Amino acid sequence: MIDLSVEIAGIRFKNPVLGASGTFGYGLEFAELIDLNRLGGFCTKGLSIEPLPGNAPPRIVETHGGMLNSIGLQNIGARAFVQEKLPLLRRYDTHVIANVFGFSPDEYLEVIRVLEDSEGVAAYELNISCPNVKKGGMEIGNDPVEAARLTEAVKRLARRPVIVKLSPHVRSIAEIARAVEAAGADALSVINTILGMSVDIYKRRPRLGATMGGLSGPAIKPLAVRMVFEAARAVQIPIIGVGGIATAQDALEFIIAGATAIQVGTANYYDPAATIKIIDGLHAYCDEQKIEQIRPLIGSLEV
């Protein structure tokens, strides 16, 4: 029996495959399409203290090898999530990671306070790297001092593990990784989307209503693998790799480069069963390679 389980911040995941925030809804949207119980876990849409309508449309544009989005963190708000979604999510045998967002440090803390007393959340993913909002997000995530300050404040309040999601828009991913690790982060998600733009040459206007958006999908995978590798060499805490993962081969690249787990994002849009196929593919790879446990593969890259 092949063992795909991994451990992050004291939480045992039955396998290293998670749905990525922003692409997996609140999880329930996928319940009729796949068996959620098979997943290691998933990250919810970014939760703010108040409901957000998101940015003006158009909000998604396909690109070569990827997708641009400017959803703007549309969500029902943390209180409605606790009341409406969590009771339904508790039925499933998988880990729910709440992605948390705020327009100021106080708002991040307010969201954590709302979630703290509710059962069914395994950990928090601190989104300090979203490129689709004018305040918060990258404003904090691009500054090691501000990122560390927020992480420290959240850690003082949170009783659950805190995973910090890093932006690729930094001078050094290793520097920001070390800063939030020193502030108490339990794990890192590496990376968020990359700010991009697309132009309609006939209308001579941006294709996105918000002008710019986050680029995701296979186009960013080599950049994400490199940043996972650099972050994993810089810190001792686990890394969750994210960025263009669509197949088991993609997932294995991240794991061998240093990721303990991976998140599947854009692939969910064109193949809702992508996460399940990746789990099956990891099993097949381990079977073929005569590997009994996936854990020794983590960070096994030889350079």
Image (spheres, rainbow, N blue to C red):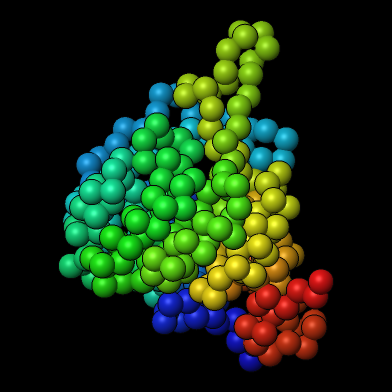
Q: Disc count in the image?
A: 0
For this orientation, the residue located farthest to the front is 145
As displayed, is residue 173 above or below residue 210?
below
Q: The N terminus lies in which quarter of the figure?
A: bottom right
Question: Quick check: can you spot residue 92?
Answer: no
For this orientation, the residue located farthest to the top is 203
As displayed, is residue 268 above or below residue 139?
below
Identify which residue is drawn at 26% across, 67% down. Answer: 156
Residue 245 placement, left or right of 211? right
Q: Nearer the viewer, residue 36 or 98?
A: 98
Residue 68 location (% of width, % of height):
58, 34
Q: The C terminus lies in which quarter of the figure?
A: bottom right
Residue 182 location (% of width, % of height):
44, 68
Residue 101 location (% of width, % of height):
34, 48
As displayed, is residue 197 above or below residue 272?
above
Residue 115 placement, left or right of 278? left
Residue 136 placement, left or right of 24? left
Question: Quick check: can you spot residue 173?
Answer: yes
Q: Which of 164 and 77 is in front in this view?
A: 164
Residue 83 placement, left or right of 287? left
Residue 50 location (% of width, % of height):
22, 42
Identify which residue is drawn at 46% across, 42% down. Answer: 138
Q: Nearer the viewer, residue 199 or 272?
A: 199
Among the 4 quarters of the image, the one containing residue 73 = top left
Identify which residue is drawn at 66% across, 62% down. Answer: 230
